[in-house]
Every structure is written in structure tokens, then in C-alpha cells.
Image: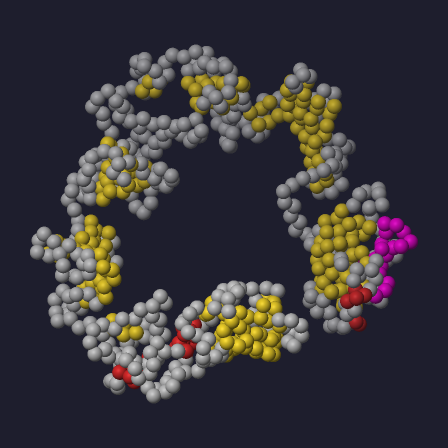
Amino acid sequence: MKTIGLLLMGLAIGGATAAAGPVSNEFTYQGQLKLDGRPLTGTADLQFSLYDAASGGSQFGVTVTKANLSITDGLFTVQLDFGASAFSGDARWLQIAVRSPTSVGQYTVMTGRQPLTAAPYALYALAAPGSAGGGGTLDAAYDFGGAGAGRQIVADSGAVNITGAGGLTVSGDVGFGTTSPAFDLHVQRTHSGGVSQPSVTLGARWRNAGIGFDEDDWYYLSVGSGNFADPGTQFIRKTNKALRFGSRDEYDGGVVNYQMTLTGSGNLGIGTETPVAMLHINDNTDLSPTGGGVLVLGSTSSANLVLDGNEIMARNNGSPTSLILNMEGGNVGIGVTPSASARLHVQVPNTDGDSAIYSATYGGGRAGIFESHQSNATPTVTILKNDGPALRVSGEVSATNAATDVPFSVIGGTDASVGGGGFAVLGSTNGSNLVFDNNEIVARTAGLASTLYLNHTGGTVAIGAGGSGSGVGIGTATPKQQLHVTGSYYGLGHMYLHALEGDGASGTAYIQARDDSTTSSINLRLRTKQASTLRDVMTLTASGRVGVGTTSPATLFDVAGTARCDVLQIDAGSDLSEGFTVTGEAQPGMVVAIDPSNPGQLMPSAGAYDRRVAGIVSGAGGISTGMIMGQKGSIADGDHPIALTGRVYCWCDASNGPIQPGDMLTTSDLAGHAMKVTDFDRAHGAVIGKAMTSLESGAGLVLVLVNLQ
């Protein structure tokens, strides 16, 4: 893409006096040259030819060659001169050919000739200097017209018109009505007082926009005729630190009417010039379903919200509709600050006799309906009391239409069963529910029997045990806790859970407290039984060990099988190790390598840059092993935890240079030790990890981030 500074060059060429001859035929051309899509930096030979057509046509003037031209980031600037006869006012195109490297091979013609617009035509004058009309430059025109104060060009009479398809471009400040402009565009006009004609008018008569001011420092932006004094003109006026929007009544002698005022403090008034709030609307039009109101939100032909001085109404196309508050979320408060604590929170002042909500009906309707949908598990109505009764009812409350003489009664009903019936049902019959009849409580779920929970979240359940504080005994008349189960099945005390499987066979689960030893040690065991197959699921030993899938856990937590969890956090180690058999002495912190004589085994490292390096014996420096992997009884087993990744302390040798944090480490000639890598070619495949602490001299422990490379 070529970039030509046409206007800049046109202004730069000139400077002739009234008696001077024509300016030079030379003009400046700037461009950017790219090679394979990238800006070229170097040297190139360029040829420039002038034509009278974008393709084909005739060449004008000579071919200009710029040899060994220096180009930086593709940018170049050249001076071109095609002779005095090259530009006659007709269109011209510039053809460019390039050769790079210089002086080698043929020139390559650039695709597409570049059109030359206004700049070169500043090279000749439309009228000769000294003839009528002035010279070909602003200086010549100024000199031709005669000297004036402040380098002004003065027309003797009539308007000065500047025409041309390119318009007028000025570099610098422009002043209208002033000889010393202080801004890019400075318009100054002196007014004699009163509302005046604007200083700037845009548009045509009666469709204008005007900008101006009068003698009282009132600033205007008008729309209409462009004359602020004309009736029917709408305008914006700035006065007394306020911005006013108004019009002149064309039927009332041009009286000013202000429809809207924006004060300096940020208050917006509509219908008032002295707003006292951020938005102040002054109007007394009463609203109705079909019209009126002070503020309307929405279209009057569809759903809209209308407000007047003391009323809010929701309406739809001329008819009242539902008024919805905070439908998508959030609470609504009436008389409560700073926030409501429920979807509708009504609070009255601390005065006697006031009611928060008053509901009354004088026809056949209801005073109120409270409804909770099936998907909502919270209570439909919650009543909180203070000193008085929580609920006061003037008359009896009955769950049926039958009369009652007690505060609350359910009269009538059927026997409760799994499939239906009952006097009272708590919950949905399609889900979990509790049903009562006159002598039974049944828990059920969607027509099936369910579990009945008593004091599920805590507390004591007394069943014929003499009141609160007693426990429930199963197999014992003297329970020691809330639930005490005693049994002697196979001589073991346990809780026995029995159910029939789908095929009718007997299925059993046990929680057993048992003693399998000659000493006093009670284990807790969770067992399941399917037909005749008995499985021990979990065992808790008297020594505090837990076994899953095994009845004799060898560690604090022993799982015989596959375990799965979302996150496993280990707090007593920071490395991942595997168990290996190590030939020779293997102390924590020693570097070990693959033992070529014993498959699957390791040995202490014994040479520098040993590519058989395998890891570091975990456990040195007080940092325990984090995790150990392996398969018992196979070649993938061993007694020494070898850290393959993570952080461990390692015995290091500083004879190859002081070790600093971040240094790559490899094996050393000192057996079982690591050293700093200095020969990176030899270290490929022999890196044990990176140092995280330093060692200036001798041998010692260095914290290493294990990362075999």
C-alpha cells in the first residue's frame, strides 16, 4: 500500500514572491515497499514513469531512476521531476518498478499504477503572477492584493468562494470573526444585546441548528430556523449553572417555555425549573386505566406502568392488569429499612392499634389464600409469636366442614394404609408423607411403605420407658443409651438387619460387637450376607485400626481392594515414591540408578552423568515419604521408597561447583551423591531434578524438586 502526502506537499511547495518565477517541477513521493508481505529493510533500485491512464496509455516525461535507495522498515522518500510539460491539469498515474538486490537482474513492475491527485498540480498556477486574480500561492495572492495588517487577504467586494472537489484543508488554527484564533476552529461574533442570531448555523432555513450566546452570558443550541428569537424554535440554554431545554411559543408572541432543566448539582426537572431531587417531575394529571398519569413506562398500546402524584397502576392497552413486584428475585419491604427479610416484609411503627396487613372481603370471595406448590418443601405459613398467642381465631378451626367444639379438630376420615386413607396427611401423597388416623401413624412414599423417623436429628425417644431421659432397649430392659441393642447370635452382640431380596431369598446385614481373641478386646464389624455368602465389609479393631475388605488391618487404615476418592490430601510427606529392592547400602537421601545385573532393582549411583539414574531414596532431612506405590509379591515391589517426583532432601557434592537454587542436578563421581550440571550435552537423560536450596562447598543435603529428564 502506497501512502502519498498530497496536501502536505502542496502546502510545502511555494514561497515565491510577487515577482518570482514558477516554482520547481519537483515533488516528493513517499511509499512503503514490502518483500513477501514484510517491510523491506536494505537497498533497492526504483524506476518511476508517468502515464495518462491507469493501464496502457502514453508516457509523459522521462523515466526517473533512483539507484541504491536506502529503505528502512519498507519506508522511502524520493524527489521526482518529470519535466515542466508533465502536468497540464489532466489526470496522471505513476508506475513504479523495483529491483532488489541492486544492480542485479531485471526490474519488477509493481502491480497497479498509483493515481496522482492534488499535490503535483500545486506546481503550476491557475493564473500567472501579476495578472488578475493573484498568484498561484497564498503568499503570491497576499502580495498581489497588497500589504494588509496581520498578513490578511482582503476582498475588495463580494464573497470569496473556494471551490473544488477536494474542499479546503487547513493545517493550524482557523478563526472566523477574529484575527487571532486560539483553537482549531475559533468563531467570534459581537452581539448588541438581547437574544441574538447564532454564531454558527448548520443546515438550511427552517431546518437549521444554531450555536450562539447573548450579552448576559447565556449560551444557546437551537433547532428550527437557527434564530433564537424566532417563534417555534426549540433550544437548549445554559444559564445560572443550569442547562434548560425549551421553546418559544409561536402563537404567544415568542414566550419562552422551559420543559426540562438540568441543574449544576445533577438534579433533572421536568415541568419545573427548580428540581429538588435527582428526578423531579411536576405534573398533576390523574392516572386512569385508559390514560393520564405523570410518568408512563412502556407502550400505552400494550403493557405499561403509570404513576401520578399518589398512585401506581399496571395496565395493558387501556385496561388494568396485575402489578408485579420483584418477580425475578429479591424481597419487597413496606415500612422497613434497610432491607426486607422476606419476599413481602411489612412493618408498622411501634404504636398501638396499627395492623401490618388488613385483608377484608365484602362479597363471596376469600380474604386470603396461602398456597405452597408441591416442589416447595418449606411451610406454607409460619406464625411467630411474642407474648400473645401465635394465632387467634374468632371461631373454631376445622379441617372439614363439620362443626367442632375444640380449638382444632379433624372430624371424619378413613383407616390409614400404605395406599391411601387417613384422617390427616402431612406431605404430598405423590412423595414422602406421614398419615394419621385415630390410632395409627404410617410413613409412606408415593403409595409404598417408608421409614418412620423419630427424633431423627437428636434427642431421646421414649417408648414405654417412663418418660423423657430414658433410652430405647432392644434385647434389654435397662438401656444404657438412647438405643441399646443386646444379642447373642452365635455368641456375639450385634444389631441384625434383615430383608427379603427380590427373588425371595433371605438377605442380612450385621453390625457386630465381637471378641475373637483370648484377651479383652472388642472389635466392631460391619457384615453383609447374601443367601449363604457372608462378607466382612468393615472392621474396627480395639487397637484403632480400620480395615475395609479385611478383618486384620495391618495399618491404621487398610483397604484390600480398589479405593476411590475425589481429593486425597497427604499431610506427612511431599513425594511420590515406588518400593524398590536396592543392591548395596541405601540410606535416605542417596541417589540411586538402575542395576544392570538385577532386573527391576536399583543400586547407589557411582559415576558422573549416569543416564541410568532412577531417583532418590526418600525420607532424608526430616521429610517423610508422601505416597508409596508397588505390587506386593512381584518384581514391582521392594523395601526402599524411591522418590520419582516431588520434594526430598538429597546428598549432594559441590566439587563440580557451588549449587544454587534452580541448578539442574545429575549424578556425581561420589557414590550416591548428586552434583551441579555444567556439561549440558552429557546431562541429557541424566538429570535427577532441580536444586531448591544451596550448597557452597563439600557434601551435604540439598532440597531437590525431583524431575527425571
Residue drawn at x 31%, y 38% is 325
Residue 611's place in the image compared with 444, above or below, is below
Q: Farthest residue to the right: give it.
A: 597
Q: Position of residue 43 (x, y in %)?
A: 61, 76
Residue drawn at x 45%, y 23% is 428
Residue 45's place in the image compared with 616, above or below, is below
Q: Position of residue 697 (x, y in %)?
A: 76, 73
Q: Quadrant of residue 164?
A: bottom left
Asked if residue 241 shows in the view, the reply is: no
* Quarter of the figure that contains the C terminus: bottom right
Side of 327 where 216 appears, left or right:
left
Q: Quadrant of residue 538?
A: top right
Residue drawn at x 44%, y 29% is 375
Side of 499 where 16 appears, left or right:
left
Query: Which residue is nearer to you in this view: 109 or 365?
Result: 109
Principal secondary structure, stretch drawn in magenta: loop
Query: Which residue is nearer to you in this view: 530 or 536?
Result: 530
Query: Which residue is nearer to you in this view: 139 or 561?
Result: 139
Side of 441 where 585 appears, left or right:
right
Does the magenta portion include 595?
yes
Asked if residue 110 shows in the view, the reply is: yes
Q: Position of residue 246 (x, y in %)?
A: 18, 56
In magenta, the rendered stretch is: 588-608
Q: Position of residue 468 (x, y in %)?
A: 48, 27
